[in-house]
Amino acid sequence: MAGKISQAKAPDHTFQEVRYLQRLIDDQVPVRVRLSDDQEVEGMIEFYDARFIRLTRKGSPNLFLFKQDIKYLYEMP
């Protein structure tokens, strides 16, 4: 049928999170993390697993941040 729109569902997971987090660790990229309560923290990701990331900070204590509490993160220039 001409003009039929595909009903294929987008995948729930792309499995790119692991690759991205590992690149941030390997390249020691500074990041800023916005939490669900709108607080922001900066540092470098040192470790991650399925539920949290460990953020290493200079001059402040390191943090374990649960992924469920993270709105987003982005790389610092």
Image (cartoon, rainbow, N blue to C red):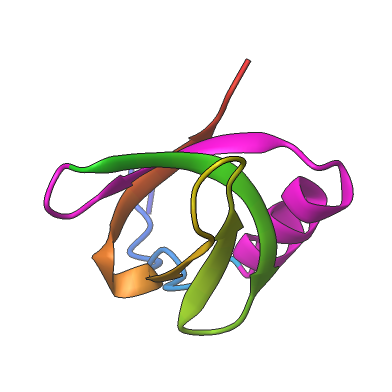
Q: State whether residue 33 appears in this view.
A: yes
| Residue visible at 50% across and 58% down in the picture | 61
| Quadrant into which the N terminus falls | bottom left
Q: Name the residue furthest bottom.
A: 50
Q: Name the residue furthest right.
A: 26
Magenta range is 15-38
| Residue visible at 39% across and 42% down in the picture | 41
Please state the horizontal and vertical placement of residue 39, each as a whole percent of the image: 21, 43
- Say above or below: 46 vs 64: above
Please state the horizontal and vertical placement of residue 70, each as a whole percent of the image: 32, 58
Please state the horizontal and vertical placement of residue 13, each as a whole percent of the image: 50, 72
Q: Quadrant of residue 65?
A: bottom left
Of residues 7 and 63, the one drawn nearer to the viewer in this rendering: 63
| Quadrant into which the C terminus falls | top right
Of residues 56 and 33, the one drawn nearer to the viewer in this rendering: 56
Q: In this image, 76 relative to 27: left or right?
A: left
Q: State whether residue 4 appears in this view.
A: no
User: What number of labels is visible?
Assistant: 0
Please state the horizontal and vertical placement of residue 64, each as a whole percent of the image: 46, 71
| Residue visible at 29% across and 72% down in the picture | 68
Q: Name the residue furthest front.
A: 59
Q: In this image, 34 relative to 37: left or right?
A: right
Does the magenta portion include 37?
A: yes
Of residues 37 and 50, the one drawn nearer to the viewer in this rendering: 37
- Say above or below: 57 vs 69: above
Q: Quadrant of residue 28?
A: top right
| Residue visible at 65% across and 55% down in the picture | 45
Does the magenta portion include 74?
A: no
